[in-house]
Image (cartoon, rainbow, N blue to C red):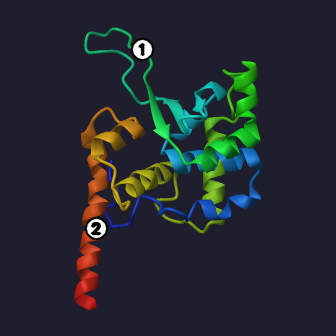
Amino acid sequence: MRLFSPTGERLYLNAQEFLSVLGEESPTNRMFCQLLHYTGCRPSEGLQLVPKRVLIDEQSIVFRSLKKRKVDSRGRKKQPEYRTVPVPTVLIEHLDLVFHIRTCQKKCKGLDKLLWSMSRPTAYRLVKRVMDRAGIKGKQATGKGLRHGFGVAMVTAKKPLPLHILSQLMGHSDTKTTEIYLQVVGEEKRQMVTDAWNG
């Protein structure tokens, strides 16, 4: 994995460039795009979300980590792995408004029903359509670019997230994978030094 192409193009999105044009999408499509933005989940992980995994009181969402190995070193089948990602209150409220999460949980009905019925290719086309509308071009205009944008936002925040926590949130098996986000911190420092020279 990397955050810059061999020719130096960034492979991640900036914080708000994706969310600015969601108004033209249906409420369910908007929610899917917001979920990707605010959690850094893989689109295939987002498509598996069900009402019982939206933790309203904890303001978190539980994802099944899909890129984990299915068997251990001895070839034995491993249990599915899950991770919890804290999210802004606004995302929980919007999910509830669109999918009636509180009602499902209160009545114990439909708790395992998928929130989105779209296929992975449809989800991919949705993300591409929103990016085209936002004028996002180049190699970062992908679902992976959106996921990388989450990682970059977490390490460049005023209070950067420690790598081991970011690794857990993103469902990485190894923190070495998460270390790619430090490249951006290096780029940010270089830009600050360059600005200081030119100032």
For label 2, the residue is 187
Give how far across and how far down residue 17 sits, in percent.
55, 65
Residue 5 visible to the viewer: yes
Classify residue 192 as left or right of residue 35: left
Q: Which element is circle 2 on? A: helix
Identify whether 97 is placed above or below 188: above
**Residue at left offset 74%, top offset 26%:** 104
Q: Closer to the camera, 95 or 116?
A: 95
Give how far across and how far down residue 41 sits, in percent.
50, 41
Classify residue 99 as left or right of residue 16: right
Characterize the local packing of mark 2: few (<14), some (14-19) or many (20 or more) Cα atoms within 10 angstroms. few
Mark 1 belongs to which amino acid?
A: Gln
Q: Closer to the camera, 182 or 76?
A: 182
For label 1, the residue is 79
Q: Residue furthest front?
A: 57
**Residue at left offset 75%, top offset 41%:** 98
**Residue at left offset 69%, top offset 46%:** 94
Characterize the local packing of mark 1: few (<14), some (14-19) or many (20 or more) Cα atoms within 10 angstroms. few
Mark 1 touching mark 2, by CB under 8 A? no
Q: Which element is circle 1 on? A: loop
